[in-house]
């Protein structure tokens, strides 16, 4: 039993160390997005505070060439629109025929739509028109590499300590 626990802790440590290398090397905090609607799941990642490619003041901002995956398939670059019109938010991926309305999923910086910051959470959004069928958007912060690295090193340390204790008892 103790040997199984030791192996499990060791494998979790290796897994955490491997995942630490997945985040961006430039240290930009990323948010992951998962939108579920009509049996499809759309996923992508963006910086928590992106620099939009296009801004239409008081209406929307656009991030271009964002890799979007549908139902865990291959990612394709898409343009994402994020809205803020008269308190009505939402987002759109026009090339995939995704148009949502509802809560604004970001806060405005001092320069308005030129420096937005996404707000992590779970949002219920209408599709195609206000009051239409709903979908769910989840925005979550991607863990920093330092956190995952610390977790992995800690688990490896626990595994090494447990192995040393088992060897001294034998």
Image (cartoon, rainbow, N blue to C red):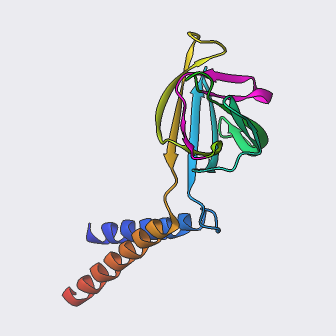
Look at 49% across and 45% down and name the residue there.
Answer: 140
Judging depth in this view, the residue of 133 and 114 nearest the camera is 114
Query: Is 153 displayed left or right of 76 in the figure?
Result: left
Q: Quadrant of the N terminus?
A: bottom left
Q: Quadrant of residue 116?
A: top right
Confirm whether the magenta stretch covers residue 86: no
Confirm whether the magenta stretch covers residue 108: yes
Above or below residue 52? Residue 126 is above
Rendered location of residue 67, percent (x, y): 73, 45
Look at 61% across and 20% down and name the residue there.
Answer: 38
All told, the count of numbered labels is 0
Q: What segment is highlighted magenta in the picture? A: 90-110
Instruction: Looking at this view, name the residue that lies furthest to the bottom.
Output: 168
Q: Quadrant of the C terminus?
A: bottom left
Instruction: Looking at this view, name the residue that lies furthest to the left.
Output: 169
Look at 66% across and 30% down and name the residue there.
Answer: 58
Instruction: Looking at this view, name the residue that lies furthest to the top.
Output: 131
Rendered location of residue 71, percent (x, y): 65, 35
Rendered location of residue 99, percent (x, y): 68, 22
Instruction: Looking at this view, name the residue that lies furthest to the front.
Output: 110
Can residue 70 be seen in the rendering of this structure? yes
Look at 41% across and 76% down and name the residue there.
Answer: 153
Q: Quadrant of residue 81?
A: top right
Can residue 11 be seen in the rendering of this structure? no
Rendered location of residue 49, percent (x, y): 59, 50
Above or below residue 108? Residue 86 is above
Judging depth in this view, the residue of 45 and 91 nearest the camera is 91
Above or below residue 58? Residue 150 is below
Judging depth in this view, the residue of 110 and 123 nearest the camera is 110
């Amino acid at each position: 039993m103790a040997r199984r626990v030791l192996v499990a802790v060791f494998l979790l440590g290796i897994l955490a160390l491997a995942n630490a290398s997945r985040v961006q090397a430039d240290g930009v905090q990323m948010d992951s997005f998962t939108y579920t609607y009509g049996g499809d799941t759309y996923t992508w990642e963006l910086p928590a505070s992106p620099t939009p490619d296009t801004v239409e003041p008081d209406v929307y901002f656009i991030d271009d060439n964002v890799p979007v995956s549908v139902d865990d398939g291959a990612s394709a670059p898409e343009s994402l629109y994020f809205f803020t019109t008269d308190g009505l938010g939402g987002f759109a991926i026009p090339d995939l025929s995704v148009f949502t309305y509802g809560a604004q999923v970001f806060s405005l910086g001092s320069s308005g739509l030129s420096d937005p910051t996404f707000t992590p959470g779970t949002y219920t959004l209408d599709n195609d028109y206000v009051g239409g069928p709903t979908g769910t958007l989840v925005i979550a912060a991607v863990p920093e590499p330092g956190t995952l690295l610390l977790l992995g090193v800690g688990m490896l340390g626990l595994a090494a300590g447990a192995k040393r204790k088992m060897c001294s008892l034998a």
